[in-house]
Amino acid sequence: KPKLLEIKGLKTYFQTEEGVVPAVDGVDIVVYEGETVGIVGESGCGKSVTSLTTMRLTPGKVVAGSISFQERDLLALSDEEMRKVRGNEMAMIFQEPMTSLNPVFTIGQQIGEAIEIHMQYSKQQARARAIDMLKLVGIPRAEQIVDEYPHQLSGGMRQRVMIAMAMSCNPKLLIADEPTTALDVTIQAQILDLMRELKEKHNTAIMMITHDLGVVAEMCDRVIVMYAGKVVEEADVVTLFTNPKHPYTQGLMKSIPRLNGTDERLYSIKGSVPIPGTLRKGCTFAPRCEYATDICRQEIPELNEIEDNHSCRCWLYEAKGEQA
Ligand code: SF4
Ligand code: MG
């Protein structure tokens, strides 16, 4: 499959009062056309900042790396060019649609605006297309809803509207950041079904940012595990679930599933994610790792391919070619 998105050596830093925080600290991610890649990890691991940086919406500063999308360097585009990419070839949906939907405009105006800008539709054509999109995402009474305001809809319906907006221009890549976290289980299942359906219909690739392993198991082809600003493991979904290698991933697998709410600290791994940048030496997981040895506290392990299509950043494993 051809590469759609290739992030290389990405570093996104934040300037805070306590100093510089490397929220994303040397991340490499490839997304192939039409696949769904899960990016998992606890709150603060850098998964959201990675996706926001890809959309060029991060408040942080990109200090190194490149983001190539359909063979164009996104970091080199002008703001104007980037606006065209966003919502056209690449779209994003968030956990809480209320913050991304504008409360003073109707649903139709908002979907319509996205369509008009990117497809040069007339107002009427855009409205008709907005109604089509609402129907496509399974919103009943679309002809009525199109003239309603976001607050008149339920959380599940608003999330559908967000998806309708995101999908209205047939993006090649949909970035979904905790798209179902705020929703109850039934609605969550419906939204995931909908995303799967749209993906199959339009061959849209999805980058699924989540801390929910249930969502990953159900949706993803490949999984990337992030910890403290770095990728620590990467494999296809079956391998990751049946044969996790990184002690952090193994901990995630043993974690307690949780049904609802917004608290991401659901894992049973003791300790907490270090504030990125506070540990400048060694493996960032060492303070929480039961296998940590001296070298772990001294040197940062590389992300190595340890088996075919299975990479891990841990001193317990050697790179494929180097194994005895
Ligand atoms: Fe644990 Fe060492 Fe592997 Fe880090 S490198 S995860 S501390 S064993
Ligand atoms: Mg997040």
Image (cartoon, rainbow, N blue to C red):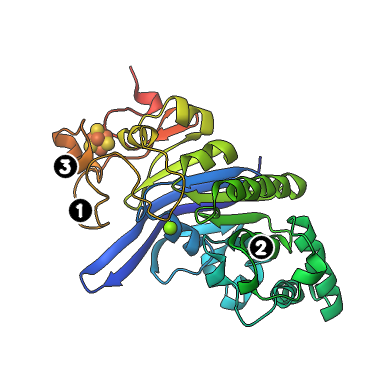
Q: Which of 273 and 255 is in front in this view?
A: 255
Q: Is residue 151 above or below residue 214?
A: below
Residue at horizontal 37 percent and vertical 37 percent from the top: 256
Q: How crowded is mark 3: few (under 14 residues within 10 Å), some or many (20 or more)?
A: few
Upstream in sequence: badge 3 or badge 1: 1
Q: Nearer the viewer, residue 68 or 263?
A: 263
Upstream in sequence: badge 2 or badge 1: 2
Residue on which the image places disc 1:
280
Which amino acid does the dot numbered 1 rest on? Arg
Which amino acid does the dot numbered 2 rest on? Ala
Do tag 3 and tag 1 residues touch (Cβ < 8 Å)?
no
Tag 1, which secondary structure? loop
> In x, y percent, where is residue 204?
68, 50
Residue on which the image places disc 3:
298
Question: Of discs 3 and 2, which sits in the foreground?
Answer: 2
Figure quarter occupied by ligand 2: bottom left
Q: Which of 268 and 203 is in front in this view?
A: 268
Q: How far apart are marks 3 and 1 (CA)?
A: 9 Å
Q: Residues within 10 Å of mark 2 (few under 14, many from 20)?
A: many
Please tell me in which quadrant of the rendered image residue 127 appears: bottom right
Do tag 2 and tag 1 residues touch (Cβ < 8 Å)?
no
User: What numbered label is drawn on residue 166?
Assistant: 2
> In x, y percent, where is residue 150?
63, 72
Which amino acid does the dot numbered 3 rest on? Gln
